[in-house]
Image (cartoon, rainbow, N blue to C red):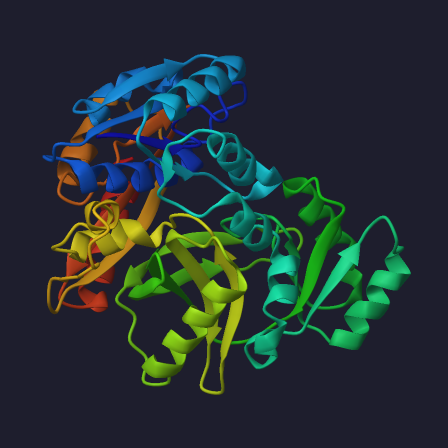
C-alpha cells in the first residue's frame, strides 16, 4: 500500500522563492508527525523534498523521497506521485488557493484522498464564505462584514467599521497562521490595516470582524464516512498586533479543559458543520474563541493543523491507520499529561557544531531538526509534563539557555 504525503513548504512549494525557516519548521513538524503514523508499518510512504534541505535528509531517512529543484519539476513530480499512490494527504495553506489547487489536481486520479475534498476547501478556505454557510449558527459567529476593495473607498470602509464599533479585527479571507491580521483600535488605523492585509493576500476582499475577548481554542476533528470524532480541544497561543505590528501564532497546548464547554452541544455543532460543508473529511480543525458568555466560531481549517503535532505525543493509537482501514476510530491517550507545542527561533552566528550542542540538548523535545538559513535558527518542539505550568517552566529554561549561550 503506497501513501504519498505532500507538505507544501518542505516539498518545494516555495522552491523558487526565499525559504522561510519559520514556515519550514512548522510545516516539517506536521509532516513528521504524519510520517510517525506510518512508521514501522507495512505501508510504503513517500514524499517530495525541497533540494535546499539536503543537509537535513537524515530527518527523512526511513521513507522514499525525491528532491525538487524547480516549480516545473514540483508540478510534474506531484502528478507522478499522485498517479502511483493508493492514498495521499495534502498539507498546504489556503492562501492563494494553494491547498485547493493541489487538491483539485489530485482528484483527477484514482488515489484516495485522506483529507478534505476540493469542494469543502473552496468553502472553508474562504473565511467569509464559511461565515455565510454557517449563518444558521449566528449566535456562535462574531459580527462580520465583507470588504470589497474594488467597490468601497476608504470612507465607505470607515463607515462600516464605525457601525460595527471599535476595536475590530481586519483579516484576509484566505490567510493562515495569523498572517495579515490586525487589531484596529480607531479609524486612524484603518488604512494601515488594509495595507497589512494586502501584503499577505492578493484577494481584493477581506473581512472586518468584531473583536471578542476570550481564550483562543481549537477543535481537532476526524471524520470517517458519517462518523465524526472530536479528537481533542486545544489551546492556541496567539498574539495580535496592530497594523504596524506582527500578529503571531506561537503554538499551543492540549488538552484544554474549560467548565464552560458543554460536550453535548459541541458535538451537535461539529456534526452540523460537517453537514453544512460536505466534503470535510479526515482530519480538520475549527478555530474558536471562548469566554464565560459564549463560544464563537472563527474559521474552519480543511486540513491537518499544527495542533496535531501536540496531540500525537499524547496518543497511544494511530489515527490514520485506523482511518485507512475504515475501522472505528478509537482514541487512547496518555493520562494526566499535557503537551505544549511551540516553535523556537533566534538569530545566531555560532558555528554548526555549537548549534548541534543545542539540538542534542533538546533531542527529546524536538520534532524537527534545528534548521539554519541566513543565520536564522528555527525548530519545532513538544514538551510534555503533568501540567501546563511545568511545561512553561521547561520552556523558560530553554529560552534562558538560548539567550545566554547564543
Residue at coordinates 61% horizontally, 48% vertically from top-left?
174
Q: Looking at the image, which residue sits at the far bottom? A: 293
Residue at coordinates 88% horizontally, 62% vertically from top-left?
156
Depth check: give the residue in front, 267 or 355: 267
Depth check: give the residue in front, 203 or 274: 274
Above or below 237: residue 91? above
Above or below 61: residue 317? below
399 on left or right of 207 = left
Residue at coordinates 26% horizontally, 36% vertically from top-left?
368
Q: How many marks?
A: 0
**Image x and y of residue 364, in percent:** 13, 43
Answer whether residue 62 is visible to the viewer in this image: yes
Depth check: give the residue in front, 206 or 317: 317
Above or below 40: residue 13? above
Above or below 288: residue 7? above
**Image x and y of residue 120, in percent:** 52, 52
332 on left or right of 16 = left
Q: Kindly indicate the quadrant of the structure image that contains residue 298.
A: bottom right
350 on left or right of 107 = left
Q: Kindly indicate the quadrant of the structure image that contains residue 354.
A: top left
Depth check: give the residue in front, 399 or 260: 260
- Pick the quarter of the image with the C terminus: top left
Residue at coordinates 68% horizontally, 48% vertically from top-left?
196
213 on left or right of 283 = right
**Image x and y of residue 182, in percent:** 63, 57
Q: Kindly indicate the quadrant of the structure image that contains residue 1.
A: top left
Q: Looking at the image, which residue sits at the far front? A: 110
**Image x and y of residue 340, in percent:** 26, 57
Answer whether residue 396 is visible to the viewer in this image: no
Amino acid at each position: 500500500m503506497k501513501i504519498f504525503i505532500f507538505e507544501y513548504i518542505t516539498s518545494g512549494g516555495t522552491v523558487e522563492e526565499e525559504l522561510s525557516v519559520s514556515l519550514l519548521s512548522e510545516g516539517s513538524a506536521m509532516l513528521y508527525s504524519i510520517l510517525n503514523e506510518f512508521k514501522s508499518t507495512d505501508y510504503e510512504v513517500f514524499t517530495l523534498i525541497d533540494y535546499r534541505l539536503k543537509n537535513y535528509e537524515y530527518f527523512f531517512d526511513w521513507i522514499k523521497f525525491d528532491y525538487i529543484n524547480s516549480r516545473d519539476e514540483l508540478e510534474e513530480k506531484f502528478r507522478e506521485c499522485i498517479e502511483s499512490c493508493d492514498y495521499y494527504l495534502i498539507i498546504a495553506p489556503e492562501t492563494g488557493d494553494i491547498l485547493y489547487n493541489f487538491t483539485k489536481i489530485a482528484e483527477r486520479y484514482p488515489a484516495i484522498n485522506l483529507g478534505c475534498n476540493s469542494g469543502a476547501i473552496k468553502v472553508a478556505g474562504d473565511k467569509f464564505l464559511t461565515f455565510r454557510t454557517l449563518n444558521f449558527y449566528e449566535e456562535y459567529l462574531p459580527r462580520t462584514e465583507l470588504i470589497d476593495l474594488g467597490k468601497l473607498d476608504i470612507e465607505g470602509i470607515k463607515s462600516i467599521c464605525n457601525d460595527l464599533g471599535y476595536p475590530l479585527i481586519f483579516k484576509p479571507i484566505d490567510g493562515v497562521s495569523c498572517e495579515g491580521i490586525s487589531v484596529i483600535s480607531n479609524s486612524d488605523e484603518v488604512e494601515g490595516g488594509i495595507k497589512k492585509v494586502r501584503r499577505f493576500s492578493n484577494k481584493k476582499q477581506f473581512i472586518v470582524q468584531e473583536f471578542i475577548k476570550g481564550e483562543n481554542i481549537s477543535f481537532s476533528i476526524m471524520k470517517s464516512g458519517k462518523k465524526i470524532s472530536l479528537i481533542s480541544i486545544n489551546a492556541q497561543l496567539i498574539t495580535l498586533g496592530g497594523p504596524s505590528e506582527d500578529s503571531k501564532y506561537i503554538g499551543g497546548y492540549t488538552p484544554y479543559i474549560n467548565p464552560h464547554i458543554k460536550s453535548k452541544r459541541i458535538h451537535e455543532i461539529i456534526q452540523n458543520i460537517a453537514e453544512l460543508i460536505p466534503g470535510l473529511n479526515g482530519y480538520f480543525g475549527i478555530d474558536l474563541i471562548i469566554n464565560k458568555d459564549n463560544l464563537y466560531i472563527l474559521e474552519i481549517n480543511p486540513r491537518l493543523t499544527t495542533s496535531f503535532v501536540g496531540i500525537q505525543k499524547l496518543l497511544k493509537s494511530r489515527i490514520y491507520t485506523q482511518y485507512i482501514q475504515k475501522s472505528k476510530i478509537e482514541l487512547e491517550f496518555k493520562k494526566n499529561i499535557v503537551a505544549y507545542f511551540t516553535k523556537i527561533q533566534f538569530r545566531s552566528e555560532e558555528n554548526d557544531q555549537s548549534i548541534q550542542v543545542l539540538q542534542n540538548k533538546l533531542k527529546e523535545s524536538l520534532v524537527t531538526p534545528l534548521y539554519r538559513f541566513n543565520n536564522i535558527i528555527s525548530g519545532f518542539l513538544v514538551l510534555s509534563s503533568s501540567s501546563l505550568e511545568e511545561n512553561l517552566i521547561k520552556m523558560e529554561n530553554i529560552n534562558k539557555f538560548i539567550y545566554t549561550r547564543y
